[in-house]
Image (spheres, coloured by chain):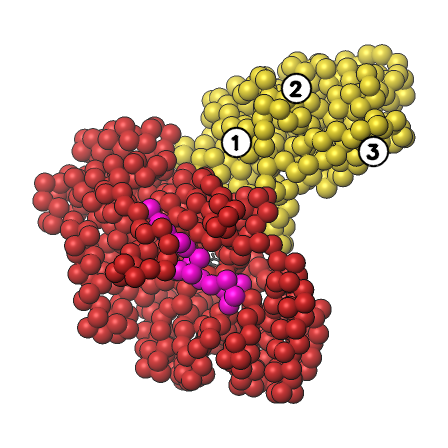
Amino acid sequence: MIFPKFFINKTRYGAVDNMLMSNQNYTYEMLRSELTWVVGEDYVKTDDSDKLGHSIDYYWVPELWHDRGQKGTVPDFIVHPGSAREVSEILKLANNYGIPVIPWGGGSGSQGGALPIYGGIIMDMKRMNKVLSIDPVSMTATVEVGINTQHLEWAVQKAGYSTMHFPASIACATLGGFIAHRGTGVLSTKYGKMEDMIMSMEVVTPTGEIINTLPVPRHASGPDLTQLFLGSEGTLGVVTKATMKIHPIPESRKFHAFLFKNMHEAMAAGAKIMTSRLHPCVIRLYDEPETAKLIKRVLGIDKQGAYLVFGFDGPEKMVDLEMEQASTIAMEQKPEDLGSEMGEAWWEHRYKFFYPPYMFQLPQAFGTLDTVATFSNIENVYWAMKNTVKENFPQATFIGHFSHWYEWGCMLYARFIIDNPPQDPHEAIALYNKIWDMAIRAAIKEGGVINEHHGVGLKLGRMMKDLYGPAFKILQDIKQVLDPNNIMNPGKMGFKGAR
Amino acid sequence: MNIDKYLDVIKACRFCFMCRHLAAVGNVTFKESDTPRGRALLLDKVRMDSKNMKNQDYIKTIYEAELSASCRYHCVNHYDEVGLILGARQDIVESGNAPQNIRTVADDLKKVEFTVEGTGDVLYYIDGYTKNHQPEIASAFLQLAGNCKTISGGDCGKALNVLGFAEDASIVNEKFKKAVKASCSSTLVTSCPASYDALKNDFPIDGINVMHSSEYLLSLGSINKPSKSINVYCIDSDYLKNYNNLTAPRELLKSAGYKLDMFGTNLEESYAAGEGAVIYDEICPELMKKLSDRVFELADNPEKDLIITFSPYTKFALKKSKPDFNAISIEEAILKAKGN
Ligand SMILES: Cc1cc2nc3c(=O)[nH]c(=O)nc-3n(C[C@H](O)[C@H](O)[C@H](O)COP(=O)(O)OP(=O)(O)OC[C@H]3O[C@@H](n4cnc5c(N)ncnc54)[C@H](O)[C@@H]3O)c2cc1C
Ligand code: SF4
């Protein structure tokens, strides 16, 4: 077994310096006993199997590290708390011992946010998976946030409603993970992102206080704490409970697809639909290379151009009316009308893109350059990133689609793919990081914001200063005040590491 | 190594999260390693360095898999993660690394003595969970089917196969085959989905038509429906649904006038309490209990609802955990519908 690296040469944690070096060390057993006392024997894991599982999330770098036979950084303990009180006890212990705590939901995050980069305690939240209540009058559900979002959706559907949160990772992520990353689903254009879906939350602060944010999301009682913790990626505390909106199952949901001559014309159509203040539940626009690559592979449409699909849901009469209006707007650009069938097919296969063999996978190197910008800037952001990748990394392919649309702009889900990255893992990671560094900085220059829904994590932490400028200090100060011992997920989101 | 045959599965599953909601064991242990991704990751480590085959934690994880095949069924490309785990178990056994508790169970499974009794054209195989713990299942079937021969005397090889003792499984199955041949029947029926799968797919017998009891009862024709339909919940069998896509159980129950409500919240998860692993109660009793507890948690009204389990194993497991759980087998349900 491999044991803690975290405590080597550490000075900030005073009393526990070098004490938890390995499972041969009695301090390790002291902490294990204390954790066991809090959550029970069944819920403290130290076996090699589970440590391996918790050493790799959906970030390409640890995947590559594993693929190249390198030893990954594993946690010292994996604990599964069953209540906010247990979370609080664990955090107090961690403060006492000076050991990092890394919340883990489903491990499906693509930014390395849940990785135990300094060892420590992985706080796997999946045991907190209950739907606590459904309020049919206000249409809200209160749930423990370790729940798998597909299980949540099934439970809410059984009660006759829907969360309307349909991300491609619905089956693998937890609600807490989505809260931590301000995640989003396919129907976000109408139903919003996580920050629009959540009413209020219970949070355990790094020092172990159990707090609740205000019960409703619209108020004038000072800055909103719900929004502070949303997107904090486990660096400011552990979210344990949330009340979220639920929705009636719509009478009708319809889709329609078009093939535009190019992305620019398709973008003009999409933007006009949004600025006309129609309310599609989905607009998705694929650039020409992604249409040729993925739309062909998954939907079988073998044509040149930019594929765009939109959908509306609600009472059928309204759906038909909005559909007609949106189609009229689209037709102004003279696209090929692929009809409703090709739109429905997209909806039906919306998750298929993410299963092997459709999804990119090693040996390929790939990354999602998730960026959001206004309609005035979004095409410039696209071209800035694309040109940067093309000019500097000729071995890379650049494709993209625009997934989540707002009244003012949209999200660009761009990807770079390298079929044969270097064998040497260090070289491969250096190349990978260089693409990110250059492409993201090019996007920021054009008014792009990294990132719209994947979060920052380990992957993009170094860009936070570029993105925020002097304002980042405010986030750092908040972190310092809430987490004086820096136990919560150190080294993520651009905050300082554990050493 | 046997796992080398499943390289495509390892490569696909090791970084894929898409079916983790269906990882039945993972859903009760919350362990990342109890998911197809987790298991593929550790078998990838074994593939890279066979010394890892000796890792006791890895071995334990591989034997804790419930083999429900929900993931394979759900998977867009149907990657055979069950095949991978079975391959790994075979590797563990062949390399002499099988844990003592597994070897003890396997030794027991090798002690078979098949006997055929009765008269009739059809041969009814009575599996261990029916014979030793739930004779009411066989009794209901025999009342419904009329004159049948019966064969019993142990597991037909499926359990050994699933534990990774492939050679021993074949030896046991040869004995079974011999007894079946000697019975001169051409139709072999069983209520046990695992045995059905074994006899249909792992060890087919030339000239013998293998049927699940629900298929056979359905083939007997119409049942007088009761005047008022009865609402019941069904707990599917992993082997019938995910391995064989068999719709006969539901068709039979509907034809007998039952109105089938969805158990739990969805039709994708396995609620079979470890049926895929055949003798899960013997090798992982605590996990069987956890899987059963999840079933009780998901039941709408566990005190009142009538639940029909499609596998004798599942009925046994659930009742072992909660003796007053209101579960009956398909055969008992049909007998009940007939007013007997
Ligand atoms: C195939 C695939 C498709 C995807 N599609 C989408 C998509 O459509 N939309 C989308 O938004 N994302 C998508 N993602 C990314 C990923 O699913 C999301 O980022 C998700 O929010 C991660 O949730 P998780 O539960 O897996 O969190 P993890 O990966 O376990 O953790 C992510 C971060 O959240 C923190 N965290 C987890 N739980 C808590 C908690 N209770 N309290 C505080 N912090 C916590 C962790 O410390 C970490 O920093 C996809 C991922 C995959 C693998
Ligand atoms: S079985 Fe399919 S869905 Fe499940 S992990 Fe493997 S590739 Fe992914």
For disc 2, the neighbor class at 10 Å (few under 14, some 14 to 19, many from 20) is: many
Determine whether the residue tagged by mark 3 lies in a helix, strand or loop.
Answer: helix
* Residue A313, horizontal then vertical, whole percent: 61, 64
Judge from the rendering whether residue B45 lies leftward or rightward of residue B248; answer left or right.
left
Chain of the residue displaying label 1: B
B66 versus A286 height, above or below: above
Mark 2: which amino acid? Answer: Tyr
Residue B62: where, in percent of width, then height?
49, 36
Q: CA distance from mark 1 to mark 2?
A: 24 Å
Residue at horizontal 71 percent and vertical 24 percent from the top: B329
Q: Nearer the viewer, residue A71 or A117?
A: A117
Is residue B229 toward the left or the right of residue B103 in the image? right
Does label 1 lie on the same chain as label 3?
yes
Task: From the rendered image, report the letter of the chain displayed in red.
Answer: A
- Whether A190 is among the magenta residues is yes
Check the image and report above or below for A348 versus B97. below
**Labelled disc at residue B255:** 3
Give the chain coloured yellow. Answer: B
Tell me how far mark 2 sits from mark 3, CA to CA.
26 Å
Q: Which residue is mark 2?
A: B129
Q: Chain of mark 2?
A: B
Q: Is residue A228 visible?
A: no
The stretch of residues the image draws in magenta is: A186-203
User: Are discs 1 and 2 located on one and the same chain?
Assistant: yes
